[in-house]
Amino acid sequence: MIIDSHAHVVIPPESYKFMAELVANRANPYAVPKLADDAVRAAAKVILDIMDEVGTDIQFLSPRPYMQMHSVKPAAVTALWTQHMNDLIYRTVQMFPKRFRAVAGLPQYRDESPVNCFKELEFRVKEQGFIGCLLNPDPTEGDAAPPPGLGDEFWYPLYEKLCELDVPALIHSAGSCSPRESYTLKFINEESISIISLMNSRVFEKFPNLKLIVPHGGGAIPYHMGRFRAWSVRKGGEFFDDKLKRLHFDTCTYDKDALELLFKVVGPDRVLFATENPGTGSAINPKTGRAYDDLKPDIEAMSFLSEQDRRNVFECNCTRLYTRFRKDE
Amino acid sequence: MIIDSHAHVVIPPESYKFMAELVANRANPYAVPKLADDAVRAAAKVILDIMDEVGTDIQFLSPRPYMQMHSVKPAAVTALWTQHMNDLIYRTVQMFPKRFRAVAGLPQYRDESPVNCFKELEFRVKEQGFIGCLLNPDPTEGDAAPPPGLGDEFWYPLYEKLCELDVPALIHSAGSCSPRESYTLKFINEESISIISLMNSRVFEKFPNLKLIVPHGGGAIPYHMGRFRAWSVRKGGEFFDDKLKRLHFDTCTYDKDALELLFKVVGPDRVLFATENPGTGSAINPKTGRAYDDLKPDIEAMSFLSEQDRRNVFECNCTRLYTRFRKDE
Amino acid sequence: MIIDSHAHVVIPPESYKFMAELVANRANPYAVPKLADDAVRAAAKVILDIMDEVGTDIQFLSPRPYMQMHSVKPAAVTALWTQHMNDLIYRTVQMFPKRFRAVAGLPQYRDESPVNCFKELEFRVKEQGFIGCLLNPDPTEGDAAPPPGLGDEFWYPLYEKLCELDVPALIHSAGSCSPRESYTLKFINEESISIISLMNSRVFEKFPNLKLIVPHGGGAIPYHMGRFRAWSVRKGGEFFDDKLKRLHFDTCTYDKDALELLFKVVGPDRVLFATENPGTGSAINPKTGRAYDDLKPDIEAMSFLSEQDRRNVFECNCTRLYTRFRKDE
Amino acid sequence: MIIDSHAHVVIPPESYKFMAELVANRANPYAVPKLADDAVRAAAKVILDIMDEVGTDIQFLSPRPYMQMHSVKPAAVTALWTQHMNDLIYRTVQMFPKRFRAVAGLPQYRDESPVNCFKELEFRVKEQGFIGCLLNPDPTEGDAAPPPGLGDEFWYPLYEKLCELDVPALIHSAGSCSPRESYTLKFINEESISIISLMNSRVFEKFPNLKLIVPHGGGAIPYHMGRFRAWSVRKGGEFFDDKLKRLHFDTCTYDKDALELLFKVVGPDRVLFATENPGTGSAINPKTGRAYDDLKPDIEAMSFLSEQDRRNVFECNCTRLYTRFRKDE
Amino acid sequence: MIIDSHAHVVIPPESYKFMAELVANRANPYAVPKLADDAVRAAAKVILDIMDEVGTDIQFLSPRPYMQMHSVKPAAVTALWTQHMNDLIYRTVQMFPKRFRAVAGLPQYRDESPVNCFKELEFRVKEQGFIGCLLNPDPTEGDAAPPPGLGDEFWYPLYEKLCELDVPALIHSAGSCSPRESYTLKFINEESISIISLMNSRVFEKFPNLKLIVPHGGGAIPYHMGRFRAWSVRKGGEFFDDKLKRLHFDTCTYDKDALELLFKVVGPDRVLFATENPGTGSAINPKTGRAYDDLKPDIEAMSFLSEQDRRNVFECNCTRLYTRFRKDE
Amino acid sequence: MIIDSHAHVVIPPESYKFMAELVANRANPYAVPKLADDAVRAAAKVILDIMDEVGTDIQFLSPRPYMQMHSVKPAAVTALWTQHMNDLIYRTVQMFPKRFRAVAGLPQYRDESPVNCFKELEFRVKEQGFIGCLLNPDPTEGDAAPPPGLGDEFWYPLYEKLCELDVPALIHSAGSCSPRESYTLKFINEESISIISLMNSRVFEKFPNLKLIVPHGGGAIPYHMGRFRAWSVRKGGEFFDDKLKRLHFDTCTYDKDALELLFKVVGPDRVLFATENPGTGSAINPKTGRAYDDLKPDIEAMSFLSEQDRRNVFECNCTRLYTRFRKDE
């Protein structure tokens, strides 16, 4: 079975209109649109066609990260939008229960504690069967001084809640207000910052069951192992490579060379298959004639991976981590 | 002829998507959508149907004010959006030249000088036949300390340009980021602030040909003439009622009693017919069975207005002010 | 009996000096002046002469709002000044118990919770027989981001205290540091903001006995009923006109046309007679030869008001609301 | 002749009221009071009586420093107040030309360049015969980051103007918004900061004719010569005591021991007689039975001063510095 | 016995390197250097040679104040540095127990409550025999709005802890980020501010056993007694001179005239011998041929001091105050 | 010949002391140390020994980046420090002209224009033979909103100067004040941000001769080519890989796998040999027994590189870029 563990919902026109209105009216006053079943189905159909074409059995759907508006004032804006997106995902999964699973967006807001997200998270997991969530390490989106790194106690209440609910979190930043750093690059930088903050922390000693996934091949870190290994040798304590194994990664790098480096550095048992298809990588690679995000053939062609390695990447790493996956079916 | 001098474009779904994306990607990177003719036509059709139903011959179309995003960082966001909206208006007017005229949005940005809008304004007026523009007295949208009042020299370069191009400006705020002040109320408050700032200034001595329209019945001022008359008596100089006649007003108040007060205070020769239909007033008044913004019957029923008064309100005040109206036909 | 429910104390020269010194020394160090009885009497005499001339029996005296210095740093400045003003009012009422009643100023400070005012409020009401208080919806006076609107839970502790003490609050802003918005216009805008914030809130469901008076004819709202009715129809729920009846208003508009609109919109049973005389309206209307704030003749001349309507406006609405009025005599 | 070179105007009640109103209305709108001759005369009389009692022939009058409101927003507040105070001083001097000379206040504003004061300064000196001015080294009054020290080029334009007009400046801070530092202590600290900033600068090389007076015995510096001598020895260059002689000082310390130290440190030819009487020192010293600011007897009793020393202190140092003193008589 | 109660540790090169690295790496990551015994000894030797030369028996060593980095972000920087300096002091005292005593630095941080210093303070006093500590009244070092004055309740928790541990605090500011105020002048100004804040407070009524020492001759206050006496007479209550006796002072003024004034004003029983040698005063006075900080001969030469006075200054005032001095020997 | 193009000076103890003092005294006042020849030689010897051991012929020395203090207020701090470091480098190169070349640090300051660096840069290049410089893309060091990205016109004046002087700039951030992002990780993130900002700009069309080197293997970009290729395909225009060839990279990644990816992605003709030895990578790799920064053996062992490739990496790419290299010998 091919599970694409990291994909985002396709947004229907009515929802874009709602988002535009939210920015304009700042939720004062506002009206939440009711999406027709047809609108939900049409959006899902776009994804299903792609899945069928590239051979994906199941996709995990979450809100489109760069559209989460975590920094747009006031907090009600992202709160309403997050609900709307999670509703859309829920209805999509209800409509196509064999093809999708739901991963929740969280209504994080600027530098506020993630405690404000508990109600939404619990509702989605307990009442609607969501199996994981996104986690934005910088909900200020570059518009202000960011909250502390993921290794800081600031995040402990959320980690406790994730453990309690037994759901993994996918570390994924949202938009970027900094004129010099596009949101797509900020994804990568935030992942690097998150990894190093966690590596320098006691988070996994405090929360041994915490499950965190760093997408996009782990930001810059697998490419800069030398730097962090040297630091780790100088400081003593657990070796950097060993500590890094507390984390999980995914394959969303859109490049075979990069993927090979990732498998070499963290091992095929820490990497989940993921494409964000349709998304950033949905453009045709002139060299291959396939889309950049059609990663399955690349992985299948890697001779240094064993059959079991590939099964792990395509399915087992994911199902081992997302324990609510099985229960919900 | 019935000219509705104050109305806003209906936004097609593709444009809502663009607006949502702009907020998410902060114009870094971005892609401007090309609207199909059908999309433009469909949006125009919504308005035309209403015009036919309520008996409007011509509408002046401008961007929907509360969606102008003048405060969203960085400046490229509102710049791109303003161009997109002005393009849409231009194409709509080109498609239905007998029914619409174009009033430009300006890419004002937070507390920056309006000089940054000259290029857009000149292009629209000189190259595309726009006949007026909107003017937002607080492009910070309540997110920061606002620029000086409209009576301040801060705005003189824009006034000079307006006089040079011989186009009126419709004073209209945009969104509101202040949690306690909705955008719809901010319209009113900004109009009051604009009027008093202009009344206490030497703007009309410096720019005797400047044409400014205060919509929505002039904010709170016609209802609070006593307060400002008393000040004016105490201070000496020109009497408040007389000085107020330098300004123009429109009928967008959605209430017959209020309209009567307006006509009484400023006189029917200073008021332009305007409805913003479809817009805020597009809800059925349970007392009349007509929409709140269907103001024509109310005005026609006002016995204290002469036939010429009505003609002035419905047409002549407007055509006298918008001198480019004739030229462009 | 003619009760002028909204008037402000006349400030003796010694108090102006104290205010000037407070601004200069920022209460570090400071010395509170002891006003001589003659100074108090002379100030009161100014008001009494006016009352006798226009035919007012009783005035409710509160601190002069625009001089409250709620935003001047540090908090001790307004705290000391408020005490001084309330002391002056108390002594004036003690001196002329048949002609005045006391309405307390509150030492609100910038964006701090109004809880800091409880001690002063309780002392004045319980120990000195004050019958109401002022409430400034923006004690930052435009110098910083304002606190949430009056519909927000931020204000609940104060509402609870007002209900417990059974005193009405007169919503009245103070000074204005914003260069574009004079304090006199800010009064109007703050009243509009307060009304809409309360209308969109659950304040009156939570505090059914809360008594709030919006002076100056209710800001801009009675003139813009069409706008808010349309919103209320679109949103459903209680109709705007009905919900507005939870509030009370006063006649301080200095204009007969405006007053007629007010009576028409909210009904004569929601309006209290008020003049702020001497104050903003104390200038001679060249059309009538009377001062703008000499409103009694205007109201008496309104033929559409019944005899009972007029009694309500001049006395009964006020005594019904200010329940401590009777008890104290 | 006894010249008291540093004294401040007594403020009439009407002016206190104006100051209070300015703070309340923030100069929007405002009305400048016209003081009656009697009000001016009454205020002057208070001073003249004291002068006669303590034996002062002539006083130099400037605005009361702590009331200058240099930090109160917006700039129009202090601009209007400064004009009003300078007008009062001018009229006082006109009324009693044998007893007073005029020293101008400057409308400095927060961290703005002192260039904004040129118009006022030139008018007072050239048109009205003022012979000097105050100079506030921190017009933010502790409410924000202060402008650079007096040794910085920020102040050069003002120094140039002072030289051009040939008038001395008395370095005197105004109010203090910092809760921990009263205005009266800030005077002292600002004088210390000013001296050291000037000592570490090239101001007197650039403006050899600049005349600056540090009142109140020179802040803390004469008491801390050891500290600054040691620095000066370590750094090389001109010795601290020598460089300090570029400055002038006055006797306003209210203490004989302190005055003796001052004379010893800077020499009697650098010190001007000054009392600020009536002012801070106008309280009876229980040890002497005289007011703390009655400094003449103390100086006369200092046996280590020669007759010429005393003449210098009481008259000649002052007339040598204030070159416009003679010309104007 | 000659006790120099106020001196600072000489910093070895390894510690300077650590400080430089801390500023560069902002404690993320960092490595604390282990000083070799030789490095500690070499640094101590510099001081011992001076002590022997000028005739000091015992010095009280604390961290060099201007290098405390209380404002450098984040708090970990000063925390690590303070530990390092206190460690160095501890080892120095252990090495030369007859010549030194330890006075702790506190890891104060910007405007945070001093409660964060309790752990360090208790450890040093209880476990390592430190006998006092420094207290910085402005740990923002001029980079931001300072915390309240020392008279404010903000500091009560620290005062309570000082009383509980029975250790005196030496009031000493650290660096200065304000371009116009060098750290060496800020010392003086902060001392003046501290004294006046304490004099206007109820601190000593609340903490009668609190022992605070104002070094450097008490800032500007002994030179400006007239000013504060006059205030105290006007306000009534305890006379300023009497209240000032709650504080203690030291001789670090580097000038004989200043020292004489200090002894005259506060009395020889409130002054502790102190030199900060080597430090600011370590430059040769060309007039005497001795270093400015070689104050012993000056004091010994003051004929107005009795033998007992001198003993008090050189030893007894200090041992009376530092009660832990005896116990530890 | 083996040229290590990216290495940093070893700092003598006297310079660490100077840096510590600069932070403490904020350059007010300050004293610049004169380093003895022996101190310079000893520091150089540390590097020479390493060079001899690993087989490097020539190193290019620049200031140690993380110690540049570009954000420490005021600007004089980094200005003095930069001069001191450049002086040290100059003297080192003068002493060992066959082994070192000088690369200048720039006194960039927070968000100020790099124009303030021209004087220093010109002096070093023209007068002292420096052959290149560092360029910090975020001199705020994370303490405030950063300046625009390197693609912005903000940097054009510097680019113009670099072209005029014909010197390459090495893009290298300095310290990091953000608690969540260590300086060592910020290096990587800033390089990624710089590359993408330059790729999205017209910098190389405007300055075709501009030579910019991105060290540390180009941040995260070579590992994330898929992401940026997909964007570039979608946007059209020059393909990402082709545009990337305008930049130069270096080998400082401390990891053979990463280096192989780098060579594969950008080609061996765009990569300069560089180690920063001694520095971050100076720790023993337990797997190889060699230091992480001993990269020469790794490169020599890469069989896919030709002999010419290796010569290019070790020497020719560098000498081609640093055109002043030859001239100066």
Image (spheres, coloured by chain):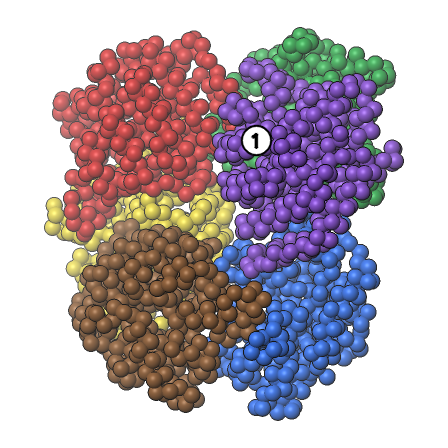
Chain colours: A purple, B blue, C brown, D yellow, E red, F green
Q: Is residue D261 above or below residue D212?
A: above
Who's the residue at 82% across and 69% down the image? B95
Who's the residue at 36% across and 35% down the image? E113
User: Residue F122: where, in percent of width, then height?
Assistant: 68, 33
Amino acid type, callout 1: Asp
Q: Looking at the rendering, in which quadrant would you find the C terminus of chain A?
A: top right
Q: Looking at the rendering, in which quadrant would you find the N terminus of chain A?
A: top right
Q: Is residue A58 above or below residue B209?
A: above
Q: Tag 1: Cα neighbours inside 10 Å, few (<14), some, or many (≥20)?
A: some
Q: Is residue C105 above or below residue B257?
A: above
Who's the residue at 33% across and 73% down the image? C6
Depth check: B59 or A42 in front?
Answer: A42
What residue is disc 1 on? A166
Q: Is residue B81 visible?
A: yes
Answer left or right for A300 relative to E181: right
Query: Residue C281's quadrant in the figure?
Result: bottom left
Helix, strand or loop at disc 1?
loop
Depth check: F82 or E130 in front?
Answer: E130
